[in-house]
Amino acid sequence: MKSRHDTTLIGWLLVGWCGFLLLPWYAQDDGFFALDWLNAGFLADRDYAPALVQALWHGRIWLLPLVVPLVLPLLALSPGATPRRRADWLILAGVLGLVWLAVQGMAVTHRGPADWLAPLVPERSRQYGVGAGAVLVALSFLFTLTNGLAARGAVKGDRFVAGSIGLVVAVVALFVFLPVGMVLVGALQDSEGAFAPAFFVAQFSDARIWGVACIYSELRCGVAWNSFLLAVLTGLSTTLLGLAFALIATRTAFPFKRSLRVLTVLPIITPPFVIGLAIILLFGRNGTITQFVSDLFGIAPGRWIYGLPGVWFAQTLAFTPIAFLVLIGVVEGVSPSMEEAAQTLRADGWTTFKTVSLPLMRPGLANAFLLGFIESLADFGNPLVLSGNFDVLSTEIFFAMVGAQHDPGRAAVMALVLLGFTLLAFWAQQRWLGRRNYTTVTGKGDGGVPLQLVPPLRWTLYAVTMPWAALTIMLYALILMGGLVEFWGRDYTPTLRHMVAAFGVTTGEHGLVWSGTAWNSFGTTIAIALIASVPTAIIGLLTGWLLVRQDFGMKRSFEFGTMLSFAIPGTVIGIAYILAFNVPPIEITGTGIILVISFVFRNMPVGVRAGIASMSQLDKSLDEASLTLRASSFTTMRRIILPLLRPAILAALVYSFVRAMTAISAVVFLVSAQYEMATTYILGRVENGEYGVAVAYASVLILVMLVVIGIFQLLVGERRLGRRRAGPVAAPVGAAS
């Protein structure tokens, strides 16, 4: 009788053999998921044939060695094999399979074989990007290897944990380290592609990056110092504002909590350039508020909105929702019993909040700051509109890549500087958290009442957040109005022509005609964003679970690696993906898949950080009790951990969806005629001066995203911790005596 582990292994072997014998080995012109090969006589058709047919009938004999690692696991399943021998066979099969897949994939391309392989392959042989068959075979080899490592005792012999680590490492290496590495290699090359470390030193020490000078009585700093200062300010302001909104939403009797949640999320669902344009219309030299203040107080209009204050203001507005999404689950997770214990010891409300509640929120505060810091470093749209003479790394990288200077080496050096700042922030976060225990959710019942905020703190938070909420309402009223007037900022005559131009529907001979110019990009954007949001949340939360709950070698390096794509500006990510995936073995440029992959690994770190912040509050005894009752790690995660991670799941889904809907810096390089995204459409309208059409489209996107976010909330639901709802502030024991 075979064990459950043997059944899983046999399943992965069947997947591998299916990919090798039945499915197309190479990518199809009609797309990865097209099924035309079923009707094309695929066993004889060179374009659709599986690997074995390619090797025996079409001359691609370099695919035949893959039979060996596909057969080796059968030896591990033989009745006489010892556990150690079984593990060795599985490890050998996995390593051989993955290595040969990589070697033959990079050595034989659409240009033909590499020189060292030429004598071994037929003349004029070539191959193209991987298809469904190759992907299944690669997965089979990967999980065969992780099964073998678990059988040898890795991660306490847990095959699910080993497989999860292997999967995350493989996809991060393939879709983060490989493309970014190809760009960063350019930092050590001169303009002709030759290895030149002296060129790197000269670029890295450039005064435009690190210099500090006084010009016309004004202090001018290099782009590195500008970016670092802006990132610190944005990280602090977004964290404090996010905490304020989270406390009001969870620890007060504020009557408009649902509306407040919508307002805090609105900036994150706004397409690029729109917030910057709205801020200019309100606070620019001729802005509505600027002119009102000038007329009322006689203050001459200024240009303060351009530069550090304007960019900081816009980034705080745009990235506070990220901090809120991370912190609200952490604030909800603080145990009321601990707060009641402090009050029992005669601590007042402020002392309890300062010494008990706030310290237990430190994982959330640290992760919120880290995300705000990195988002500021990588932000492209707000500095492009509002920076003025305040240059930052993200825009400088963009102009170095696509501007007239076209200096990829300089762009790569500045990308390295961004990575250095991210590593510094990551190290500071770890130092601040230390090795303290922040567990607040255990397996025991907790019937405590969450502590409401003391009046001075509550009114202080109201005083900070309500003006911010009013400003947000004003900005979005202006944005929604912009698509319904003749000319935004000048002529406010009502009109629907912008909406008709973007989303017009007429009738023709064959029924309805979607005549608006935005329909194609609108449908593509929603489909790709929905598809990308699910794997983003799954991979992100799975990674967070591994980092918090499992012990394995190089865990800190693994954690930093998952943040790498988040730290690199989208501009660099877009170009890196073109360099890495425009040629075999992975040839996906111009397809919808490359957009999905770029969104998944660009936005995954938010799911990781939200998962880490929430999981740090869950007692390990919950997992241990489930495992003691002979449940597997997969069952424990599915039935015990995931229901307690609903705030983190919602944060990951919402963030990944709206970021895919509003991304611009990476997709501008990855879109094609078939797969145009909403943001590139809006960018085109802005460049042509069609602000009305751009804002009308942005308004529709905002409404659609609000609806989808509501659906996500209904599907995910709320986390139930068995606690009572907050009531009046409890008086400390003995206060009445």
Image (cartoon, grey):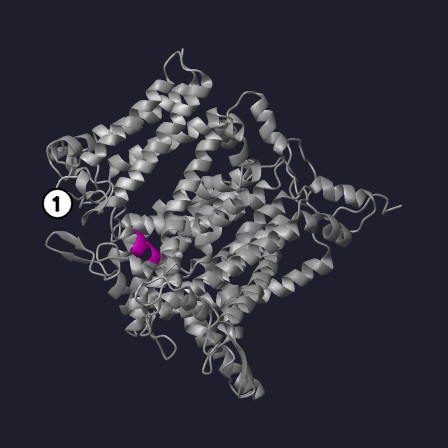
Is residue 497 positioned above or below 244 on the image?
below
Residue lying at 33% horizontally and 20% vertically, measured from the top left:
74
Determine if residue 452 is in view: no
Q: Dot 1 corresponds to which residue?
A: 124
Residue lying at 54% horizontally and 34% vertically, measured from the top left:
641
Q: In the rendering, at what x and y percent does residue 543 appear?
A: 49, 41
Is residue 179 positioned above or below 406 on the image?
above
Determine if residue 61 is in view: yes
Residue closer to the observer: 680 or 481:
680
Q: Quadrant location of the C terminus?
A: top right
Q: In the rendering, at what x and y percent does residue 91 appear?
A: 40, 28
Horizontally, residue 232 falls left or right of residue 497, namely right
The secondary structure making up most of the magenta span is: helix
Hey, which quadrant is residue 522 in on the image?
A: bottom left
Residue lying at 60% horizontally and 27% vertically, measured from the top left:
624
Residue closer to the observer: 230 or 331:
230
Q: Residue 579 lies in magenta, yes or no?
A: yes
Horizontally, residue 441 falls left or right of residue 312, namely right
Q: Quadrant location of the N terminus?
A: top left
Hey, which quadrant is residue 6 in on the image?
A: top left
Number of marks in picture: 1
Horizontally, residue 494 falls left or right of residue 216, namely left
Residue closer to the observer: 536 or 480:
536
Residue range (magenta): 576-580
Q: In the rendering, at what x and y percent does residue 186 appear?
A: 36, 61
Residue closer to the observer: 262 or 272:
272
Mark 1 crowdedness (10 Å alpha carbons): few <14, some 14-19, many ≥20: few
Hey, which quadrant is residue 395 in on the image?
A: bottom left
SS class, disc 1 = loop
Q: Residue 470 lies in magenta, yes or no?
A: no
Q: What residue type is labelled 1?
A: Arg
Residue lying farthest to the right in this orientation: 737
